[in-house]
Amino acid sequence: MIKTWIQSFQIKNAYRVNTFIYSLKQLPLIGKVFKNALYGNTALKILGTFYSIIVELISTFLGKFLYLFFLIYLILPMYPSSDGSYFVHLLLFLTGAGALLNTYLFNPTKDKYYAMFTLKMDAKKYTLSDYYDRMLKVVIGFMPFTCLFGILSQVPVWICILLPFYVAAFKILVNVYFLEKYKRTGIVTDENHPVKGVWLWILFFLIFAYGLPYVQIVLPLSFSVLFLLLVVIGGIWGIFYLQKYSKYREIYKIILTNDNMNLAAYQTKNMEKKTVQKGIDVNTKIVSHKTGYAYFNELFVKRHSRILSKSAIKITWVMIGIFFFLTVFTLSFPVWKERINSILLVMLPYFVFIMYCINRGQEVCKAMFMNCDHSMLTYGFYRKPKVLLNLFKERLKSVILINLLPAFTLALGLVFLLYITGGTTQFLDYPILFFSILAMSIFFSVHHLVLYYLLQPYNQESETKSATYGIANGATYLFCYYMLKIRIPIFTFGCCTILFSILYCLISLFLVYRYAPKTFHLKN
């Protein structure tokens, strides 16, 4: 069993290391210089192993922390709790829902396929070694956080220590039931295809977890502890059942199919395609009076108005509603004027993140690829520099105009709100505030489209294959999120924002004209 576990760990580690090296290979300089030689680099393999260990640690601890913190600990203030009974009650029933959603045993993964059907490993030994490994991680991952949040919720320490074993034991018993079900009926449980009965049980557990405490009905702590102990004892019995069971290979022959293992990715892509297709207006009466690339682009924008311009219009109406509420609130409660005014005078950096969130540039680029470039890039003439650059200019105009509507509303609303809350001693703050918001909108419009043209991340199947594109988007998000913490006067930050946006746009447009004809193509 230990030998099998070591082999399974090596398979997972090799898969993660190769994925890590593949991501490095997508980076512009590294990928061009080293190409496939990266896979034989010892130093990179060691670095990839560290990456694999970090992923393992994150998967062991982070998810458990977030689960207990958000789904239980933050909910507790809603209920009157004094003896820890509410904490245990919530965990008791949520574990039931979690055990049905994440069986581990019936989750079709690529490492299982490689191990059992490519490397011909013993199905039973591999399944059990992998499953026990996961259950051990459940206990280890939950232990520090059940103790932390349990003690903070006044749960006795010994019960906090018992809770992770209860979670693992419950999962074991659920899998015992599904294995016995297959033996009796021949029906295989598949985590990617839960049956209606499973969803009903999940709903039952959620209602009992959150619904009963809402009406102040909660299991007594003594009863909960008795149930926990019984489940843990049942889990020990379940381990013996798993050891005796012999039909693992039969089950995995049924659920380990290529379509099933790629189901999550397929469902995501399929959902995106359906969403985009629903937003297309196929009305043949839609026309354009422009010519050339402007004609081509205008038809695209008009037929995708539900995805592009209409979403911007909805955001605009939401903003109008928010500013109307703030105006009424300010006029009704003058005592808040000074507070709101002091916030507006130094909170302009905060709106960098807001503009990032409401800007439609990234969605527009995705729609452009899925319903235009996805097909057009297969034609040679479409990749010619003149075609690309002319169409880029038309698209840039459209993206900027789409995003300027909510940006103009936000800018005007902020100026008006600043004025009615007491204004500012520097008259230039008003135009600087207004034009800095517009500059942010133009910046993000240019930024997303330029990234799309310089790092075109999609392949023929609409999968993102550019690690550089992901890094660039991640860095953009982190920068905008960091701006939430900055407090700078309107004039100073506004002038810097406008100048930066102008310089960035000029440099970005030069890069597109210089390199886009070489970089704008389908990824392999």
Image: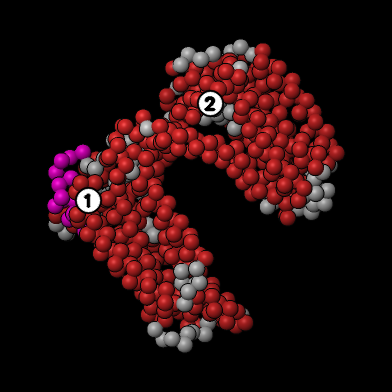
Q: Residue at position x 61%, y 29% from top?
A: 134
Q: Nearer the viewer, residue 321 or 365?
A: 365
Circle 1 — which element? Answer: helix
Q: Residue at position x 42%, y 79% from top?
A: 491
Count neighbours of disc 2 (C-alpha within 10 A) and say few if under 14, some if 14 to 19, many if 20 or more. some
Front label number (1 vs 2): 2
Q: In the image, residue 194 lies at what x, y percent?
A: 56, 30
**Residue 254 visible here:** no
Which contiguous range is marked in magenta? 378-393
Does the magenta segment cover residue 387? Answer: yes
- Up-down: is 18 above or below 5? below
Residue bearing mark 2: 9
Residue bearing mark 1: 516
Q: Nearer the viewer, residue 72 or 138?
A: 138
Q: In the image, residue 362 lies at what x, y percent?
A: 36, 53
Q: CA distance from mark 1 to mark 2?
A: 42 Å
